[in-house]
């Protein structure tokens, strides 16, 4: 039988970079997409999906070496992973920890599911704007067609 110690999560530490922790289960790949990290990224990226968490049951974690994060990326992460925490690592230590928070208006990030919406017009579409009606569970409403959305799809 496995020793209790061996059941703990082991991921190599990073010297400098960011750790996005407490990501909703299954959303780590979306976080990488928000950060623009694809196959051509050169620094170390570690990713854990569906690992046990005290508060969330299961969670995802993303660690990126030599990378910072800006407020627009943090806002996008808040939409798909409202419990996420952003830890900045310097010289192997956590120097800041920030819980993401949703902005009141989400501009140009989410696709309206209504095909008739003016934000989906083939010619000269308008940038999407969603109003946060409720945070938990998440309910957004399209500013233009008022379509309500609870599982937002990010624009690519
Ligand atoms: N040098 C490092 N390299 C990689 N990951 C790190 C490093 N330092 C901390 N972490 C990770 O960053 C996250 C936050 O670290 P911290 O030490 O604050 O853990 P914690 O006390 O569990 O925090 P929280 O209360 O947010 O869960 C954890 O997932 C931890 O594994
Ligand atoms: Mg923890
Ligand atoms: Zn709409």
Image: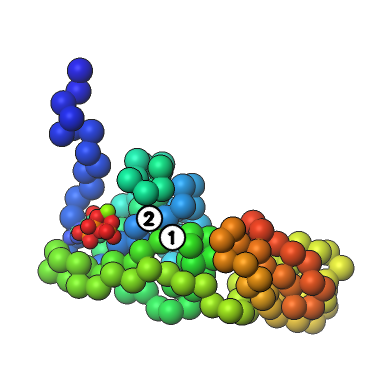
Q: Is residue 91 left or right of residue 152?
A: left
Residue 47 place in picture, x, y as percent: 35, 50
Q: Is residue 24 left or right of residue 140?
A: left
- Residue bearing the label numbered 1: 83
Tell me the quarter of the picture where residue 14 sits.
Answer: bottom left
Q: Which residue does the image show at 31% across and 58% down from the upper left?
A: 63
Q: Residue furthest top?
A: 1
Cα separation between marks 2 and 1: 6 Å
Residue at mark 1: C-beta within 8 A of ligand 1: no
Q: Which residue does the image show at 18% across and 30% down from the upper left?
A: 4
**Residue 67 or residue 85, whichever sits in front:** 85
Q: Which residue does the image show at 37% across and 74% down from the upper left?
A: 69
Tell me the quarter of the picture where residue 129 sits.
Answer: bottom right
- Residue bearing the label numbered 2: 22
Tell me the quarter of the picture where residue 91 sits.
Answer: bottom left
Residue 16 appearing in the image: no
Residue 119 place in picture, x, y as percent: 77, 75
């Amino acid at each position: 039988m496995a020793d209790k110690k061996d059941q703990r999560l082991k991921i190599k530490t990073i010297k400098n970079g960011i750790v996005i922790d407490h990501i909703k289960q299954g959303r780590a790949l979306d976080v990488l997409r928000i950060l623009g990290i694809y196959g051509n990224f050169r620094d170390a990226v570690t990713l854990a999906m569906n690992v046990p968490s005290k508060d969330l049951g299961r969670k995802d974690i993303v660690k990126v070496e030599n990378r910072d994060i800006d407020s627009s990326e943090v806002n996008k992460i808040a939409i798909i992973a409202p419990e996420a925490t952003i830890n900045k690592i310097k010289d192997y230590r956590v120097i800041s920890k920030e819980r993401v928070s949703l902005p009141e208006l989400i501009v140009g990030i989410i696709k309206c599911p209504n095909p008739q919406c003016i934000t989906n017009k083939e010619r000269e579409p308008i940038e999407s704007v969603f109003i946060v009606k409720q945070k938990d569970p998440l309910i957004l409403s399209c500013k233009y067609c008022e379509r309500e959305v609870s599982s937002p799809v990010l624009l690519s």
